Image (spheres, grey):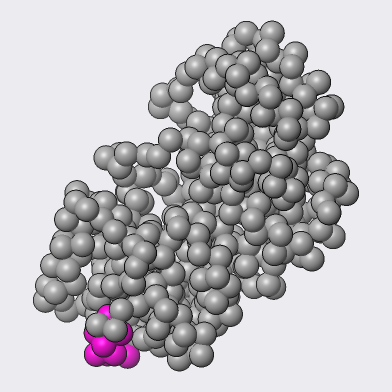
């Protein structure tokens, strides 16, 4: 086991867990599942993971590792029961992490455990994923096992109203920064080589994001900046657990946008000179945009934007450039049926927030939360445009957003000190 893996295991895993891992038979492929509060569905998900591993070459030695991030609904007991049940397939083991019990730490614990047992190919999944097919596991792992990729990231088919934080902010900002057009910055699952994990794990532990989304961002940025061979795999439609209570939007922004901004400070030498972008290799068909089965209320989003202009103006004046504010204020007069928030203006807003985060103009979590009404305004404008287009035309809208962020990149880099 690499020295980084040994140190990480000692830091993240209990002594009892290490003893249990040492009793496992040799492992070549490890699939880790991190979970928190998913008692209603964790067993069925683990069964699908087990079945997916069964689709790999039978000679490969595999293990399913499960880490709980502090559930209070009996999830950990169900995981224990599943791991203890007699199984003919892959080995099963619950990974017990040391405090604090957080889903981000559970994610890191899975990586450390996979290195500890000597796995050469590692996949990690969020138990929030619903509708996962058994073919997802081999689809993720096979490019790593075949030597074609160091890091495999998912791509999904989805409706225009799904994943708007990704399509309108995370993906275009990452594209502009690091020059790669990947769909998912936080995709809920990924696969990677053990050597990739061993190189990055000490830094990810040092970052210590409390939430799994922050670890996903860190892995993605590491893959894009460290010369890793990145491959995108189309997995079909992504669902989330319908019974899982989602955090509020402002909290989601803090958990995702915050780590992207924080990592810019560590990776400046990689992103600052980067201009333009290109796609990463893809396995499988291109993702498609699906029709929206239901349409969220654009009117409500526009009202939230207008309320933000009224109530958060003193905060935004500390974050946004004067020219940005001058272009935003007229939007207060736009009714929902005429509301527009151009990609270029949105890219400038995002750039202003990134600079304010870097310069610590406000407490960072408070600053990111202040982005919420602006984001809702942008999504309202995006959905109005997307719903006027055929599904295939929405792909072009995604690209225009990405190009707007690339154009803004020069301005962002010039202001970074």
Left/right of residue 105 with respect to residue 367 in the rendered view:
left
Q: Where is residue 113 in the image (x, y as percent from the top left)?
A: 37, 79
Q: Is residue 40 magenta?
A: no
Depth check, front residue: 211 or 243? 211
Identify the residue at horizontal 50%, vertical 90% (top origin). Answer: 2
Q: In the rendered view of the protein, which quadrant contains the N terminus?
A: bottom left
Q: In the rendered view of the protein, which quadrant contains the C terminus?
A: bottom right
Left/right of residue 158 with respect to residue 346 in the rendered view:
left
Q: Where is residue 116 in the image (x, y as percent from the top left)?
A: 39, 85
Image-quadrant location for residue 355: top right
Q: Does the magenta stretch include residue 25?
A: yes
Depth check, front residue: 106 or 177? 106
Identify the residue at horizontal 75%, vertical 13% (top origin). Answer: 330
Query: Is residue 348 shown to the viewer in this render?
Result: yes
Q: Where is residue 290 in the image (x, y as percent from the top left)?
A: 48, 35
The magenta stretch is: 17-26
Q: Position of residue 127 (x, y in %)?
A: 33, 56
Looking at the picture, does residue 297 appear above or below residue 259? above
Image-quadrant location for residue 279: bottom right
Looking at the picture, does residue 9 appear above or below residue 40? below
């Amino acid at each position: 086991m690499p020295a980084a893996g040994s140190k990480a295991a000692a830091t993240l895993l209990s002594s009892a867990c290490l003893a249990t891992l040492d009793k496992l038979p040799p492992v070549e492929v490890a699939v880790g599942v991190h979970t928190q509060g998913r008692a209603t569905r964790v067993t069925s998900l683990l069964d699908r993971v087990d079945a997916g591993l069964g689709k790999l070459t039978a000679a490969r030695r595999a293990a399913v590792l499960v880490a709980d991030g502090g559930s209070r609904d009996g999830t950990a007991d169900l995981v224990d029961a599943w791991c203890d049940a007699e199984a003919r397939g892959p080995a099963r083991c619950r990974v017990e992490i040391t405090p604090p019990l957080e889903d981000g730490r559970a994610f890191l614990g899975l990586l450390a455990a996979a290195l500890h047992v000597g796995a050469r190919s590692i996949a990690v999944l969020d138990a929030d994923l619903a509708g996962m097919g058994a073919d997802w596991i081999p689809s993720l792992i096979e490019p790593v096992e075949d030597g074609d990729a160091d890091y495999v990231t998912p791509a999904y088919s989805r409706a225009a109203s799904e994943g708007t934080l990704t399509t309108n902010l995370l993906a275009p900002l990452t594209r502009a920064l690091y020059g790669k057009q990947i769909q998912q910055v936080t995709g809920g699952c990924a696969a990677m080589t053990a050597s990739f994990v061993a190189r990055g794990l000490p830094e990810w532990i040092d970052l210590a994001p409390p939430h799994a989304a922050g670890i996903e961002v860190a892995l993605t940025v590491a893959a894009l900046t460290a010369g890793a061979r990145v491959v995108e795999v189309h997995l079909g439609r992504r669902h989330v657990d319908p019974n899982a209570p989602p955090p509020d939007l402002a909290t989601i922004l803090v958990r995702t946008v915050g780590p992207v901004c924080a990592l810019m400070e560590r990776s400046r030498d990689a992103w600052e000179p980067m201009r333009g972008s290109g796609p990463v290799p893809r396995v499988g068909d291109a993702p498609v945009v699906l029709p929206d089965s239901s349409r969220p209320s654009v009117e409500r989003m526009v009202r939230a934007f207008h309320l933000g202009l009224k109530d958060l103006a003193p905060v935004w004046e500390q974050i946004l450039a004067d020219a940005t504010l001058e272009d935003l204020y007229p939007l207060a007069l736009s009714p929902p049926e005429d509301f527009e928030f151009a990609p270029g203006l949105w890219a400038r807003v995002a750039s202003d927030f990134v600079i304010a985060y870097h310069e610590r103009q406000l407490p960072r979590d408070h600053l990111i939360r202040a982005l919420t009404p602006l984001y809702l305004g942008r999504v309202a404008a995006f959905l109005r445009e997307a719903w006027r287009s055929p599904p295939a035309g929405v792909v072009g809208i995604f690209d225009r957003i990405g190009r707007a962020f690339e154009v803004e990149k020069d301005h962002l880099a010039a202001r970074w000190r």
